[in-house]
Image: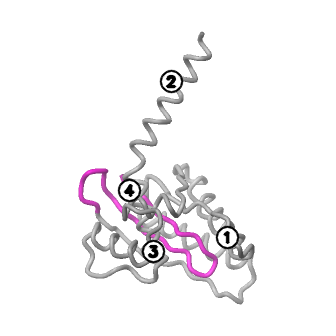
């Protein structure tokens, strides 16, 4: 399974591609950040993020895109920018028919570190270890994008089984 992880942000949108299957060693295929100038007009920033995501999709041809689920923060402006960047990533993937999964920050932290309250340094250290890298990816947005991809690879099989069980249960209820 090849997954593009996206840590959305207007100034720095982390992107990382990981390939592998649950229970086996994973491989990083690429990591980076799509940057936009903070003083640029919002529409231009969103177009720049779209172009960057499209380039990553073209270059790596992922089977899935995992995006950090936007969560409530005290700073509404930050939440809005994150949500807008997240929507751009989802749009780019959906336009190509690539399934999109949303994972919460605590879900990602728990998947890669064992604790949903892990800090950025712990996430970076575990991503480095899990992908057998020489050093943690910088900036932290890049490491977070890889963590999202890892989380999806590890959780997708269980999520698929749950969805199939739910679908079968729904069919049984309808036929009774």
Query: 65 or 171: which is nearer to us?
Result: 171
Q: CA distance from mark 3 to mark 4?
A: 26 Å
Query: Alpha-carbon neighbours of circle 3 within 10 Å: few (<14), some, or many (≥20)?
Result: few
Q: Which mark is residue 168?
A: 2
Q: Are marks 1 and 4 in contact (CB under 8 Å)?
A: no
Q: Which residue is mark 3?
A: 119
Q: Which residue is mark 1?
A: 73
Question: Which of the 4 image quadrants contains residue 29?
Answer: bottom left
Q: Are marks 1 and 3 in contact (CB under 8 Å)?
A: no
Query: Alpha-carbon neighbours of circle 1 within 10 Å: few (<14), some, or many (≥20)?
Result: few
Q: Residue at x 59, y 17 (%)?
A: 173
Query: 83 or 87: which is nearer to us?
Result: 83
Q: Which mark is residue 2?
A: 4
Question: Which of the 4 image quadrants contains residue 11?
Answer: bottom right
In the rendered image, residue 114, in percent from the top left (x then y), is placed at 37, 61
Quadrant of the image for the C terminus?
Answer: top right
Residues drawn in magenta: 1-26
Q: CA distance from mark 1 to mark 3?
A: 17 Å
Q: CA distance from mark 3 to mark 2?
A: 39 Å
In the rendered image, residue 134, in percent from the top left (x then y), is placed at 26, 80
- Judged from the image, the secondary structure of the residue bearing numbered disc 4 is strand
Question: Which of the 4 image quadrants contains residue 37?
Answer: bottom right
């Amino acid at each position: 399974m090849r997954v593009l992880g996206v840590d959305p942000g207007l100034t720095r949108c982390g992107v990382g591609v990981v390939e592998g299957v649950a229970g086996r060693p994973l491989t990083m295929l690429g990591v980076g950040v799509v940057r936009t100038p903070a003083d640029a007009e919002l529409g231009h920033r969103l177009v720049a993020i779209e172009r960057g995501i499209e380039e990553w999709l073209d270059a790596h041809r992922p089977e899935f895109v995992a995006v950090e689920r936007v969560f409530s923060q005290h700073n509404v402006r930050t939440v809005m920018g994150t949500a807008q960047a997240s929507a751009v990533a989802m749009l780019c993937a959906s336009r190509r028919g690539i399934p999109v999964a949303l994972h919460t920050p605590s879900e990602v932290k728990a998947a890669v570190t064992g604790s949903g309250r892990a800090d950025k340094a712990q996430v970076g250290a575990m991503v480095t270890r899990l992908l057998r890298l020489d050093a943690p990816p910088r900036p932290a947005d890049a490491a977070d994008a890889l963590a999202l991809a890892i989380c999806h690879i590890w959780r997708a099989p269980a999520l698929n089984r749950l969805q199939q069980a739910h679908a079968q249960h729904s069919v049984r209820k309808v036929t009774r």
